[in-house]
Structure formats: structure tokens, C-alpha cells
Image: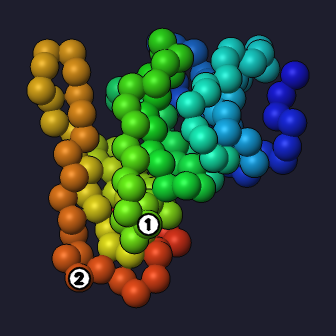
Amino acid sequence: VGHAKPVHGFVHLNVSSRRLAASHGLERLIYVWNLETCELLSKLEGHRSFVIRLESDQASETVISLSSDGEIRTWDVQALIQLQVIAVERDAERASAILYNPTHQCLISASRRPVLWLRTSHQLDSDTLAATHLAPRGHKHPLLGALYS
């Protein structure tokens, strides 16, 4: 049993010496698969709109998802739980694209301007993302993609 609608993308992760994949399509769910057995491990629920993009962070065994309503969620793929929700109420600030850079351990989201999300540790075992606006004046229309090096 897999996706009910077409798959639009997936990411690969190595989690505790297991090869996993997370996939998304025109659904509100993220499917987590064991690539060695082709077994569906879990359906991650939480988005209120269909998922349009996935990024992965191998180091923290995390998947980052973006839904069509601009909501960003982070997921622990080892524990198969949701970690964080980033939802912006203003239409002009809602994310339309995301990109994770593993070298700098940061996430960039974009709508009319790019926003840099840096991992900051507030507690011993708890990481959160803190935002920094990269383009104060922004773009006239929402961004569709971003590259970061």
C-alpha cells in the first residue's frame, strides 16, 4: 500500500545504518520507506495541504517538508515524529520554496524574499531554527526556487 495519488518527489536518508526514503505527492502525507525491504514504515501526518517539497538532513536524521499553504514542518525520521511547525500567517511571507544546505546546516525558505533558518541549540537535546531575512525589500512575486553555496 503506497500513495493514492502520483508521487512528486522523494529524499534518501541513511538512518541508524538503514537506507530509508521519504516520498510525497498530491497528498498531505509523507511516506517513509525502508529501501532494503521496500516496506512502508510510516505515514507522517500533520500537513493541512498537499506536500510540495522535501529536503533531508542526514546528520540529524531529519526530513523538512513544505506544503502548498506555505507551512514548513521538520520530522525525526528515526522516531517517525514531527519536531517543529513553521507557519506564517501573512500571505506575502508564506514559503513557496525551501532548500537545505548540509554543509552549513541551514535551511533557506523563500516567498517574496529568502529567509535563512539557522539551527540554534536552546537545550541539550532540543534544536530549533531561528530566522534571518536575507533580502529586506524582497521580490515582487513569490520565489519558485533557490540555490545556496
* Most foreground residue, 121 or 93: 93
- Checking the image for residue 91, the label placed there is 1
23 horizontally vs 90: left or right: right
User: For the residues marked 2 and 1, what is the alpha-carbon distance in whole angstroms?
Assistant: 16 Å
- Badge 1: how crowded within 10 Å, few (<14), some, or many (20+)? few
The x and y percentages for residue 118 are 21, 46
* Label 1: element kind: helix
Residue at the front extreme?
A: 89
Q: Position of residue 141 (x, y in %)?
A: 46, 83
**Residue 105's spot in the image, x, y percent?**
27, 43
Q: Residues within 10 Å of mark 2 (few under 14, many from 20)?
A: few
Q: Amino acid at mark 2?
A: Arg
Is residue 103 at all visible to an observer of this figure?
A: no
Kind of residue indicated by mark 1 = Asp
User: Residue under circle 2?
Assistant: 137
Q: Earlier in the sequence, mark 2 or mark 1?
A: 1
Give residue 62's quadrant in the image. top left
